[in-house]
Image (cartoon, helix red, strand yellow):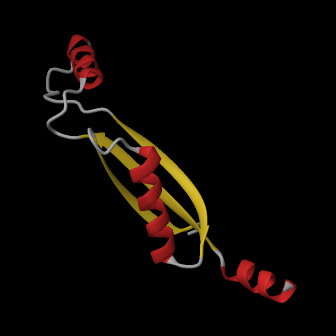
Amino acid sequence: MKYYAAWKEAKALQWKAKVEITLKRAVLDPQGIAVKNSLKALGYEEVDQVRVGKYIELTLEASGRKEAASRVEEMSRRLLSNPVIEDYSYTLQEAGL
């Protein structure tokens, strides 16, 4: 049994996921409006629109890219975003690259 556990651990790779969460276009963004108004008050008249979102970095172990992507997809859908009002996207790469 120890042999199997050691083999399983040796096969796990570290992955880095960068998740971006934004409000859906149809959802009002009061924080974005406040930031836009503040930028204009500071003289940045060229700013037309601001949308505020979240950025989350995760490091996880998975045996391959497909498994890592599946887990990040599940985490994003179940906890990191509110699918009713938010969209998410992510990039995935082997950690250390």
Which residue occupies the foreground of this view, 3 or 90?
3
Which is more toward the observer, 11 or 40? 11
| Above or below 28: residue 42 | above
Q: Which residue sits at x=19%, y=27%?
A: 28
Residue reaching furthest to the top: 41
Choose between 60 and 74: the one closer to the eye. 74
Q: How many marks?
A: 0
Q: Position of residue 51 (x, y in %)?
A: 25, 33
Q: Residue at x 26, y 25 (%)?
A: 32
Q: Please name the residue shown 25% across and 21% down the image.
A: 30
Q: Is residue 4 left or right of residue 26?
A: right
Vertically, is 45 above or below 71?
Answer: above
Q: Give how far across and how far down residue 4 sits, in percent.
A: 78, 87
**Residue ranking furthest to the front:** 1
Among all residues in the image, which is located at the extreme right? 2
Residue 73 drawn at (x, y percent): 41, 60
Q: In percent of the image, x 83 and y 88: which residue is there?
A: 3
User: Residue 82 falls in which quadrant of the image?
Assistant: top left
